[in-house]
Amino acid sequence: MKKDVLFLTGIENFSTIIEKDAYYVDKTSYLKELFMSSSEVMNALFIRPRRFGKTLNMNMIKSFCELNYQNPGDKSDQKKLFVDNGRNLAVAGDDYKEFREKIMGEFPVISISFRGVEGNTFQSAVSGLLGIIAELYERFLFLRESVKLSEERIKQFNEIYSFCTTKYKKLSDPDNLNEAIVICGSFLATLAEMLYREYGRKILVIIDEYDVPLQKAVIAEEPYYNKILEIIRKISVTTFKQNPDPWLYKGIVSGCLRVAHQSVFTDANNFTTFGMNAEPYTGFFGFTEEETHKLLADCGLSEKENEVKEWYDGYRFGDKHIYCPWSLISYCYAATQKDIYAPQQFWVNTSGNDIVSMFAKNSIEAHDSGNVDRLQQFSDRNIIEISLKEFTTYPDINNNMDFDIFMTLMLHTGYATYAEETNSCDKVKIRIPNNEVALCFKSKFENFYTKNNHHWFNQTLSLVDLLMENKTEEAQPLISTMLKEFLSIRNSGDELYYHGFMTGILGIAASTKGLEYHEEIETGTGFSDIVLTNYDTKTACIIEMKKAQELDDCYDVALDATKQIIQKDYASKFISKRYKNVYGIGIGFAKKSCEMVSLGNLTHSSVSV
């Protein structure tokens, strides 16, 4: 293992990575395809999951193309970054010489990211956008000294900059908010027009994470999707219109979701969308198998390749298997710097948009067992088939969402990937990509079945009361209802699934009720599955569980469970301690249903097998 490999995790600035001699996986070979090839497009929209290198690639493009504003024609910065750095980047090759002469350092570049545009209210989102505009305009303050631009244009520039820096916290005033909305829709075109007039060169526009404001607007406490959509659409219309302004050279946009593509870029029909399976860019984002093999070898971690593959591989983009770059770099950093070899979860903790938990919660509260069952199949790492749903507006995940719509979102956001068997364009087969994402589902499900979920927690409290009173006729349908709402990482064909289910619901509620909860404790001549005890009332409930192969066999296996309670004398421990009520209950499970058989109070009844 090598210790001298430098990783700048979390740094998405290309020049910083190169200047500090940090590790970089070369993606510069795609530049010629993007700017000077037979497949070159006017405007490109790249759709990839989060943390797959979109921002770094956008910044790399900016660094390569951007004009030296103080000394046009000077390309020394690009030569240091891309050519004379000893890295042998693809774009430094002789076959790229003509390309470098025509594209490198030739264009004014307007580059922005909408990643930070969020908030629980529309005003807070607009405020965030004003902050981004202020930072952008600050980079171009030198335009105020221009001798080529009219006084009126410079005045407009100053007014936008001044408003963004002084009024961004005063949007509760309706007049300020209205003016802010106007500025948000026109700032990019205003700046582009000025740069075009100043330098006589067309403008490259880069927008990273274009869809983040739309995602955040849907899950906000006060949703404002339509309002923020109008702003993003206005930016698109004024920048990428069907008959573009003479100042536009090319637009490059990135995001996670196609959901807003048609609604945002309605009047920009010269956009080409490159999804995960779109050639020739399937390897542009994320790490290919070859790139991963080299990375691990460079770190002295080649012996960990199989383990790394299980954890961070699994994404299928076209005919390529792609690794999550954020996770892989984070793993290599930990392994080389801290001698930590065990893979960990890195990618899952980077998202604030918890649509997995929201979908599960909404499906359960809507009693949609179909959604829950299919989500269980998926989380059990089975391959499932869905119909791709390409929609023009972001779906309302606060309501009971269609399962196919939800899984299309999962594909876009990296929680799912195409299975190798998929060839169709509409009906597709999908699966969980790797161990890291599988553990993500586990953690989200575990967090869901807690006291924080009042719907679930209230049912667990009711169930404990019924069991401690031996009211099995009422407890049985309640357990069956809860089973239909339960999601687990354990397959329901495994007896451990049911054990985990009962352990989870009874363990949560027992402490709240002041009960003792015991699992697999020694009683009599064996170990009972679950025991609930209340010392104050001298009551114990002994539960033995068994799994049936078919629903019709549930009663028989529940009866077998009660026989085991008697045969192994599970009640003797509590009877000897003078408990007044010792209930013996057998439960037979099959699929999402159960049968219960009660032995009654074992302290004063004679039960024979």
Image (tube, rainbow, N blue to C red):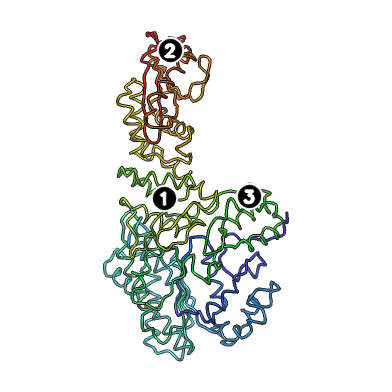
Question: From where the camera sits, is residue 550 visible?
Answer: yes
Query: Residue under circle 3?
Result: 307
Tags 3 and 1 touching, CB below 8 Å: no
The residue furthest bottom is 148
N-terminal-most mark, 1 or 2 = 1
Amino acid marked by disc 2 = Val
Above or below residue 578? Residue 92 is below
The residue nearer to you, when weighing 156 against 360, is 360
- x, y percent for residue 552: 37, 29
Amino acid marked by disc 3 = Glu
Mark 3, Cα crowd under 10 Å, few <14 / some 14-19 / many 20+, is: some
User: Residue at (63%, 50%) from the top-left corner?
Assistant: 307
N-terminal-most mark, 2 or 3 = 3
- The quarter holding residue 501 reads top left
User: Residue at (57%, 55%) from the top-left corner?
Assistant: 313
The residue nearer to you, when weighing 339 against 96, is 96
The residue nearer to you, when weighing 203 against 599, is 599
- x, y percent for residue 201: 49, 87
In the drawing, what numbered circle is on residue 356? 1
- x, y percent for residue 244: 38, 83
For the residues labelled 2 and 3, the Cα–Cα distance comes to 51 Å
Mark 2 or mark 3: which is in front? Answer: 2
Question: From where the camera sits, is residue 207 visible?
Answer: no
Q: Which image quadrant: the C terminus?
A: top left
